[in-house]
Amino acid sequence: MARKKTPRDRLEEVASDAASLSESLDGLRFIAREQAKAREARRLLQASEIRVQELSDAIACYESLRSSDLKPIKIKKGRAKKGKSPHTFLALASDWHSCEIVESSETGGRNKHNESIGQERASRYFVDLVRLVRESQQRFLIKDLILWLGGDFMVGEMHGVESARSCNLAPLEEIAAIKEILIGGIDYLLAELDVPQIHVPCSPGNHGRSTLEYRYRKSMAYSYEAYLYRDLAAHYSDEPRLDFDTSDEPYKVVDAGGFRVGFHHGHEIRYGGGVGGLSVPFRRSFYRLQSTYDMDAMCIGHFHQYGYYSGVGFTNGSLVGWNSYAAGKGLPFEPPAQVAALISHERKAVGRVMPIWV
C-alpha cells in the first residue's frame, strides 16, 4: 500500500516542477535571442548584398564612362546676331524729398539728410544713370530712355507743423529749388547720352499737394508738382529728344518696344505692414488695374522701398533715405537708391534690374 503524500511531499513536487519550468523558460529565452540574432544577421546580410550590388553598378558605370566608345555630341555654333538687340532703358526718379531735414539721431546714425545732401544725392543719381546707360550700350542698342518723374520731390505742407519742422523752405521755394536740380540733371543727360528719345512720364506725389486733404477730383489742379512738370515741359518744348507726359491721367503708360509700362506715385495703395510686406497690396493693385490701363508692368514710389516683383513691376526707393516715416511704417532700413532696368524689345520683358546708388 502506497504511502500517503504529506504536505511536505507536495511542496517538494511543486518546487521540482517550478525548477523544471524555469529551466524551460531559460531555454525558450535563449532560443528567442538566437532567433533575433539570426534575423538581424539576415537583415545585415541582405543590406550588404544590396550595397555590394550598388557598388558593382557604380564601378560598371565608371568603367563605361572611361570607355573609348563614347561619342560626344557636336555643339553647333550659334548664328551671330546682326547688330545689338534693341532695349529701352528705364530709370525711376521719385521720393527725393530734396530739402527734408533728417537728423542722424532720428535714425540711430543710419542716415542723415538736408538740402545740401539732397542736392549731392541728386547729382550722383544723374551721374550714375549716365554710367549705367553707357555700360548697357556696350551690349545692347538702347532705342530710348524712360525717365519717370514720380513725385514727392518736395516735403510740402501735407503734415502741417511737422512738415514745417522738417523743411526750412516754403512750398514755392521748394519747387524752385527742385526745378533747378531737375533742369541741371536733364541737361546733363542730353549732353552726355547718345539716346534718340527720352520719354518723361510725370506723376505727382502726395507731398506735392496744396491741400491738407487729398482731393480725388481735379487732383492735378491742387498739386505743386503738376505745375512743376508743366513748367519743365515748357522749358524743353524746343528739344525734340524729350517727350513729356504731363496729362491729368492718373496712370501714365509708356510703350517700350511692345512692353507697356504703367506709372503712378503709389499713394492710393493701402499698406500698413504685415505678413508678405509691400508685395501683397502692390500685386493686388496691379492685377486690378492691369486690364484697365493695358500694362505689362507697373512702377510706383511712395513707400521708399527698392524692389522688383516679377510679373508685376517695380517699387522705387528714395533719395532722402530711411527716415521717421519709414521707421513709423515699420519698413526695414535700406540705403538711398532708385530703380533702373532694361526692357527687351525682342522678348517683351524686363531684363536686367539694377540699383542707382547715391
Image (cartoon, rainbow, N blue to C red):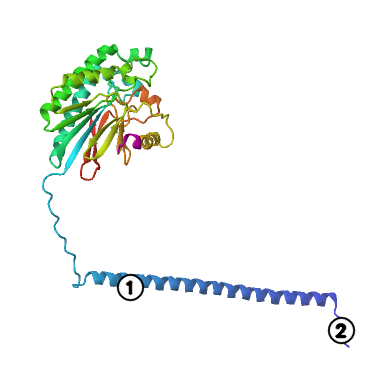
Q: Is residue 163 above or below residue 128?
A: above
Label 1: which secondary element: helix
Find residue 56 and name its label.
1
Earlier residue among tags 1 and 2: 2
Q: Is residue 307 visible?
A: no
Residue 302 magenta-drawn?
Answer: no
Say left or right for 6 vs 77. right
Dominant SS of magenta comes to helix
> Which residue is tagged 2?
3
Label 2: which secondary element: loop
Q: Is residue 31 visible?
A: yes
Task: Residue 225 in the image: state x and y as whole percent.
Answer: 27, 19
Question: Which of 136 and 51 lies nearest the eye of the viewer?
Answer: 136
Callout 1, which amino acid?
A: Ser
**Which residue is at a point 12% across and 51% down the rendered structure image?**
80
Question: Which of 6 and 267 lies nearest the eye of the viewer?
Answer: 267
Q: Do the CB atoms of the residues marked 1 and 2 lie less than 8 Å apart?
A: no
Callout 2, which amino acid?
A: Arg
Task: Residue 144 in the image: state x and y as whole percent.
Answer: 17, 34
Say left or right for 83 vs 215. left
- What range is drawn magenta here? 290-295
The quarter of the picture where residue 184 lies is top left
Give the distance between the C-alpha atoms of the residues marked 1 and 2, in whole angstroms. Answer: 78 Å
